[in-house]
């Protein structure tokens, strides 16, 4: 390819670029991107080795919650595919440097992580026997597309090269000299096993909003005035959309009547509840008869206004907690948990260590949780706590 200089451009085009710094910048960036990716131009033969970044938790060490690097599932033409964040060992990844480089500051690491590429499985998730683990090497390629021969936004990973591993013994791989085991000490989450509710919620937001509007328009929904007064005083405004969408789907598809029985709790109330439970377990108090073990103060989504506890009645059957006598199978067969998950919320019945089927919540990032608790955690009045919480966007 011959070299061209700026002076050879048409004067009109030169003038346009010179007067538009944004456009000039974008042209330079396109050139850089093309140069970085040029070695993968022949997509049919390219094989880009990459290290799996998704699968660990960078923000906390409990293994719970969501993280910007979480694997995500996307639906295309009725099939579900897995998307993972990868560090490509050539091309763009190589240009950025490894996110576990110990010389990076936390802020620099966040920037690098946000610039890494997402690779989609080249086969639907049902056909992947075991998803890849953090630190695994996968083989990637760019799907054919418009830029040169390839589409550099269409990174795929080959599913036939994934090492099989027992999902119950997942660890961060230390083979292959992955430096991540030293940097990220959080519990590893198996890819695909735990979806990222916030991510999925973001992808289905339009559907959730549409269902919330249908809730508003439907005057046949049972208990609606009781729901609305709860929402007005006991929930984060952004969570109301999710709650309405879920209740609408439960009513319109299952004819389920939803009774809300617990929504917001202040951090102080949560602390008292947890102490009662701990005292009972230690043999120094009476059984508080809670449906499940209360989370630590400030760690319950009830403290953030993004959780509700509910009972559902379909026909003559009411679905409740374990104490109430409803089995997990009955819950699953009701189809209600699927509705909760479909809007990106977590169903408490999925928790093996603290099974809580009457609970649903919207997960938030650890940074957001801390921000909300800082703003509201010392407030003892529910009204002022909810006001402080409502001022903080969950996004
Ligand atoms: Zn709950």
Image (cartoon, rainbow, N blue to C red):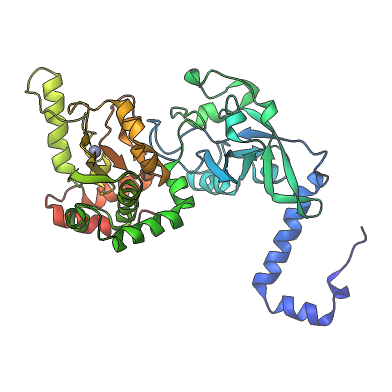
Where residue 348 sits, quadrant-wise, is: top left
Q: Is residue 98 visible?
A: no
- Pick the front one: 341 or 274: 341
Q: Residue at x 15, y 25 (%)?
A: 278
Q: Is residue 297 visible?
A: yes
Where residue 265 sits, quadrant-wise, is: top left
- Pick the front one: 374 or 337: 337
Q: Is residue 228 left or right of residue 285?
A: right
Q: Residue at x 50, y 39 (%)?
A: 70
Residue 228 % position (x, y): 21, 57
Q: Is residue 230 left or right of residue 69?
A: left
Q: Is residue 97 left or right of residue 347?
A: right
In the rendered image of this protein, does residue 215 appear above or below residue 199? Answer: below
In the rendered image of this protein, does residue 98 appear above or below residue 162? Answer: below
Name the image quarter holding the N terminus.
Answer: bottom right
Q: Quadrant of ligand 1?
A: top left
Name the image quarter holding the C terminus.
Answer: bottom left
Residue 110 % position (x, y): 51, 46
Q: Residue at x 57, y 23 (%)?
A: 173
In the rendered image of this protein, does residue 26 appear above or below residue 295? Answer: below
Q: Residue at x 49, y 28 (%)?
A: 190
- Pick the front one: 220 or 7: 220
Residue 232 % position (x, y): 20, 59
Residue at the extreme front: 315
Q: Is residue 205 left or right of residue 244?
A: right
In the rendered image of this protein, does residue 317 appear above or below residue 325? Answer: below
């Amino acid at each position: 390819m011959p070299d061209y200089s700026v002076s050879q451009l048409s004067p009109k085009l030169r003038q346009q670029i010179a007067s538009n710094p944004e456009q000039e910048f974008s042209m330079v960036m396109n050139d850089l991107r093309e140069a970085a990716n040029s070695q993968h131009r022949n997509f049919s033969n390219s094989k880009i080795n990459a290290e799996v970044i998704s699968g660990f938790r960078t923000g906390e060490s409990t293994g719970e919650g969501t993280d910007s690097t979480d694997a995500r599932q996307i639906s295309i033409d009725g099939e579900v595919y897995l998307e993972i964040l990868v560090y490509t060992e050539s091309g763009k990844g190589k240009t950025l440097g490894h996110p576990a480089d110990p010389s990076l500051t936390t802020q620099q690491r966040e920037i690098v992580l946000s610039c890494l590429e997402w690779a989609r499985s080249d086969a639907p998730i049902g056909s992947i026997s075991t998803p890849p683990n953090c630190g695994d090497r996968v083989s990637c390629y760019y799907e054919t597309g418009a830029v040169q021969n390839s589409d550099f936004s269409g990174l795929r990973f080959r599913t036939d090269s994934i090492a099989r591993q027992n999902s119950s013994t997942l660890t961060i791989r230390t083979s292959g000299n992955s430096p991540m085991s030293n940097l990220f000490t959080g519990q590893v989450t198996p890819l695909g096993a735990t979806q990222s509710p916030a991510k999925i919620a973001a992808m289905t937001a339009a559907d959730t909003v549409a269902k919330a509007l249908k809730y508003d328009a439907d005057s046949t929904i049972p208990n609606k005035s009781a729901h609305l007064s709860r929402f007005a005083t006991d929930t984060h405004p952004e969570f109301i959309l999710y709650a309405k969408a879920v209740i609408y789907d439960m009513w319109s598809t299952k004819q389920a009547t939803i009774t809300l029985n617990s929504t917001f709790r202040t951090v102080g109330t949560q602390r008292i509840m947890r102490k009662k439970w701990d005292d009972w377990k230690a043999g120094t108090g009476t059984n508080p008869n809670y449906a499940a073990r209360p989370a630590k103060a400030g760690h319950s989504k009830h403290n953030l206004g993004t959780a509700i506890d509910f009972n559902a009645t379909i026909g003559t059957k009411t679905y409740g907690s374990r104490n109430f006598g409803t089995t997990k199978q009955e819950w699953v067969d009701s189809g209600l948990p699927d509705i909760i998950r479909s809007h990106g919320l977590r169903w408490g019945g999925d928790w093996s260590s603290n099974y809580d089927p009457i609970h649903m919540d919207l997960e938030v990032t650890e940074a957001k949780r801390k921000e909300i608790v800082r703003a509201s955690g010392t407030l003892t009045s529910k009204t002022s706590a909810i006001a402080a919480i409502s001022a903080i966007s969950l996004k």
